[in-house]
Image (tube, rainbow, N blue to C red):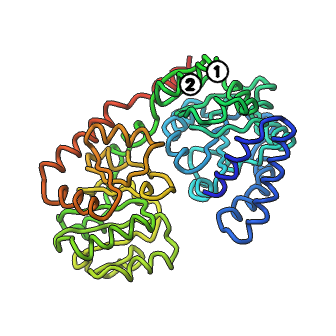
Amino acid sequence: MLNNELCILAQTFFTLNLLYSISIYLLSFVLKCIAPFNKKIRQGVTGRKQTFLKLETALSASDKTLWFHCASLGEYEQGLPVFKALRADFPDHKIVLSFFSPSGFEIRKNSPIADVVVYLPLDTKSNARRFLNLVHPELTIFVKYEIWPNILKTLKAREGKALLISATFRENQSFFKWYGKQTKEALFTFDHIFTQNEKSKQLLLSIHYTQVTVSGDTRFDRVTDQLSQDNTLGFIEEFKNNQLCVVIGSSWPEDEALLINYINNEARDDVKFIIAPHNIKASQIANIKRQLNKPTLLFSEKENLELTHYNILILDTIGLLTKVYSYADIAYVGGALGTTGLHNILEPAVFGVPIIIGNHFEKFPEAQQLQSHKGLISISNQKELNSALHLFINDSAAREVFGQNNFNFIKNNRGAVIQILGFIRR
């Protein structure tokens, strides 16, 4: 999160060319100073040192290329349906996939949709020229919101075609403020912007950007694709043993405090719980396990054990949660009790699962819509969590209604990918 916060500061407050350039160099200095004390930032600093060498090794001047850029893992998953389709449409092109955040790069550095995966270099003019000299993309796609003025302006000057997909905008962003000249100009480098909603389109029109289409959110297409995948996990089937199962996805300590209290003091013994913490450091996992007073095992300890004997399974690994949601009868999605940001609620929703989240979801329109469609319940304290879990655990009709509402919501909001690909292919 610190990476993104520093970048937002750089993009928001320094709008003139000189000041923006100074802010990027300052950002580089700050990241290097913090790197020895923060693993994620250290990964980013180290990874960026390798970017140009990786590109020089993987690409030649004669290659035809496409460039996809994502801030982090969430944006990658959002853009993936489009990336897959373009991979098939342009088999003779090499694909460059870039990330800003380590949480995206480290997990998807071997993505099969790309020929080379790199960290995006910091947005200096010299880096922009060097990066684009190596990549020379015929088509560039940015996902959701990351805007880097020097790179985008250099791309535009070279008559490169660029699209922004699944974009969302808010009135308080710099694009729509008097001090946002630099970032506003960067927005105008895109040949077309596909927004998630009408409000975002109207904000763009208010600054006279007119090449905009409301296509919806590509994540609906992404999660729908999960239904056609093989989601079978034998160890989950054994653990669940046909009992009611609550899946707790991407939980943070503030989520876990309430949930552990519920499990220890309120939960029925015939209900199973799967906990997938956001932080899977050994110390954090051990702390969660230590606080639970019911039979608990870790994913890493499951071999040669009778999984049916345990009430709680903690996933001390990554990459399984999407499939695990297919076994959920109830889902709790973390992040919104604190300030870290709500995690992806569409992943459990597509499986027709009722959802519980925290109360800080103002920046997540899909959560607001699912709440209005009676697909989820928002809680802010222990009493409200207990009440929501009691409802879904004890009332099968409520589970069915909320779950069906979620499934219908996903079904009715598909189609963004078709619009985007139609524009590219014409």
The type of residue carrying mark 1 is Ile
Secondary structure under the numbered disc 1 in the rendered image: loop
Tell me what residue is drawn at x 32 percent, y 46 percent.
349
Q: Position of residue 86 (x, y in %)?
A: 56, 33
- Mark 2 falls on what kind of element? helix
Q: Quadrant of the N terminus?
A: bottom right
From the viewer's perspective, is residue 254 above or below residue 58?
below
Q: Label 2, label 1: how many angstroms apart (C-alpha)?
A: 7 Å
In the rendered view, tell whether residue 186 sits above or below residue 269.
above
Lateral position of residue 2 relative to residue 30, left or right: left
Q: Amino acid at mark 2?
A: Leu
Instruction: Judge left or right: residue 46 versus residue 143.
Output: right
**Residue 25, x across and y down, in percent:** 84, 50
x 56%, y 37%: residue: 144
Residue on which disc 2 sits: 203
| Residue matched to label 1 | 207
Residue name at image x 29 percent, y 47 percent: 376
The picture quadrant where one finds residue 2 is: bottom right
- Say which of 78 and 213 sits in front: 213
Q: Is 410 displayed left or right of 208 in the figure?
A: left
Residues marked 2 and 1 touching at CB (< 8 Å): yes
Q: Position of residue 41 (x, y in %)?
A: 69, 62
